[in-house]
Amino acid sequence: LTPTPTPMQLNALGLHCFWSGSLDEARAALKKGLEGTPDSLVDHVILAAAHAAQGQEREAKREEQEILRIEPDFKLKEWVPRQFSFKHEEDTERMMELLRKAGLPE
């Protein structure tokens, strides 16, 4: 009912676009959501994965730095399974691999 989507709605859209392969749209939605909630760890994580998936190393590294600024003790193996409940193990592994590519610590 609002003319402007909320950061949470933009996060959901970004995640949906990411998994459907619309990475440009995912990045646009996530960046827009971050305007309202600049410390949204989830948005930065998905954004890092989207950049890594497209080989945008500099942008992925920038997101890695933001993630570690927000949560200095961030560890992939603890955070990803707790945050994302993927139905298929290969989806968890794909997300982990992209975030490794972005430079995030195990």
Image (spheres, helix red, strand yellow):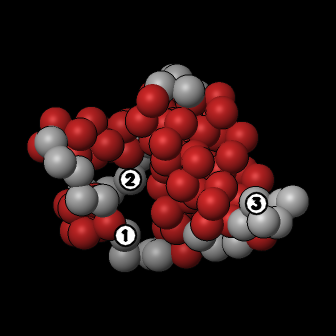
Amino acid found under the numbered disc labelled 2: Leu
The image position of residue 4, as x and y in percent, is: 84, 60
Res 74 label: 1
Could you tell whether 78 is left or right of 103 in the image? left
Res 5 label: 3
Asked whether the beta carbons under mark 1 and mark 3 sit within 8 Å of each other, the answer is no
Q: Circle 1 — which element?
A: loop
The image position of residue 55, as x and y in percent, is: 51, 23
Examine the rendering and report whether any part of residue 88 can be seen. Answer: yes
- Quadrant position of residue 93: top left
- Quadrant position of residue 90: top left
The image position of residue 72, as x and y in percent, is: 45, 75
Q: Residue at x 54, y 55 (%)?
A: 12
Res 51 label: none
Q: Earlier in the sequence, mark 1 or mark 2?
A: 1
Res 104 label: 2
Asked whether the beta carbons under mark 3 and mark 2 sit within 8 Å of each other, the answer is no
Q: Earlier in the sequence, mark 3 or mark 2?
A: 3
Q: Quadrant of the N terminus?
A: bottom right
Q: Nearer the viewer, residue 85 or 71?
A: 85
Q: CA distance from mark 1 to mark 2?
A: 8 Å
Asked whether the beta carbons under mark 1 and mark 2 sit within 8 Å of each other, the answer is yes
Q: Nearer the viewer, residue 99 or 80?
A: 80
Q: CA distance from mark 1 to mark 3?
A: 28 Å
Q: Circle 2 — which element?
A: loop
Q: Earlier in the sequence, mark 1 or mark 3?
A: 3
The image position of residue 86, as x and y in percent, is: 23, 51
Pointer 1 local density, CA inside 10 Å: few below 14, some 14–19, many at least 20:
some
